[in-house]
Amino acid sequence: MVKVKNRKGNSWKREVKADDVFLSDPKDSDVVIPIMGPSGAGKSTFINTLIGQEVASVGHELQSHTAHIQHFTFIHPSLPNRRVVVIDTPGFDDTDIDDREILRRIAVWLARSYDAKMKLAGVVYLHEITQPRMLGTSRKNLDLFAQLCGPDAIKNVILATTKWDELPNDGTGALRESQLKGEHWKHMLDMGSRVHRFDGAQRSARRIVNYILAKEPLDAVQIQRELVQIGDILAETDAGRTLRFTLQELLVMQKNVSANIRRGDEDLTMEAKARETDEKILITLRQIKELNIPLSRRVMRFLRLSSKS
């Protein structure tokens, strides 16, 4: 449990925009559970199944469907005198919104809930078991998610696999689940996270939420603590810093593609990859520019990063 000295920090309020949505009547007795994961992982479906009503709009196209933070409240049988607030969040692979804006929306909602003294019970992170491997977008979602939570909140995280009904009953799903546990999720599991299967039934969704509600509520996830308690600007949170690592990876990718082209690999696939990489670099540079970090802090950060390289 993170001990709070005060709640005076309000730098997060500078990040609020006119179209941001929040609860009209937040209560200090509210229990908050964000539902996170890549686009298409089934976050809205999970929420509808959990509550037992079609409250969250479900997308069936390739494009991301949840653009803004959406919240839904219901009364859980084990907590008849308190509201459970589940949050439907956009994934960090949204087709129309850049990562910085998605990070801002999630961060501001969490900061508002913390400022209103709402209790963060834990987080559900959804992953499609139908994916044969951890793709780049899924890896980025997981990395940003882990940065958002921070080490203190990991023990209240459920890593839930979805879409089991879309796999043949031949052991494929179990093998992929084992790979996730042994590789991509191992660090989080070692720190206390748990893996559950969401099979599409309400009892399955309730079992996941029941596990979180049975644990001691969190005082704050990493980004709440940094935005509200420490008073950092969004650009300087751990999740914000992850954008810089994205740029570094793209620059390495660009260098490798250029080397292949210089060696004579001038096929259409390589040229298309070069154009795609260049476009991603420009987008990431624009996102970093929009962070508006004061010059003095940029210089100090550059010196710290240079000393480590």
Image (cartoon, rainbow, N blue to C red):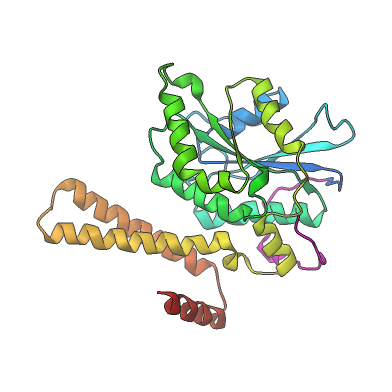
Q: Is residue 300 left or right of residue 113?
A: left
Instruction: Using the image as rendered, state which of residue 221 and residue 1 is in the foreground.
Output: 1
Instruction: Using the image as rendered, state which of residue 54 and residue 169 is in the foreground.
Output: 169
Q: Quadrant of the N terminus?
A: bottom right
Q: Residue furthest right?
A: 81
Q: Residue furthest top?
A: 169
Q: Is residue 95 magenta?
A: no
Q: Quadrant of the C terminus?
A: bottom left
- Residue 34 is drawn in which quadrant? top right
- Residue 254 is drawn in which quadrant? bottom left
> Measuring 46% from the left and 33% from the top, which residue is drawn there?
178
Q: Is residue 66 left or right of residue 87?
A: left
The image shows residue 7, relative to residue 211, as above or below, that is below
The image shows residue 43, relative to residue 49, as above or below, that is below
Q: Is residue 13 magenta?
A: yes
> Measuring 49% from the left and 32% from the top, which residue is drawn there?
128
Q: Is residue 245 left or right of residue 37?
A: left
> Measuring 72% from the left and 26% from the top, which residue is drawn there?
51
The image shows residue 8, relative to residue 125, as above or below, that is below
Range of residues picked out in magenta:
1-24
* Image coordinates for residue 5, horizontal then vertical, percent: 82, 67
* Image coordinates for residue 190, horizontal then vertical, percent: 57, 46
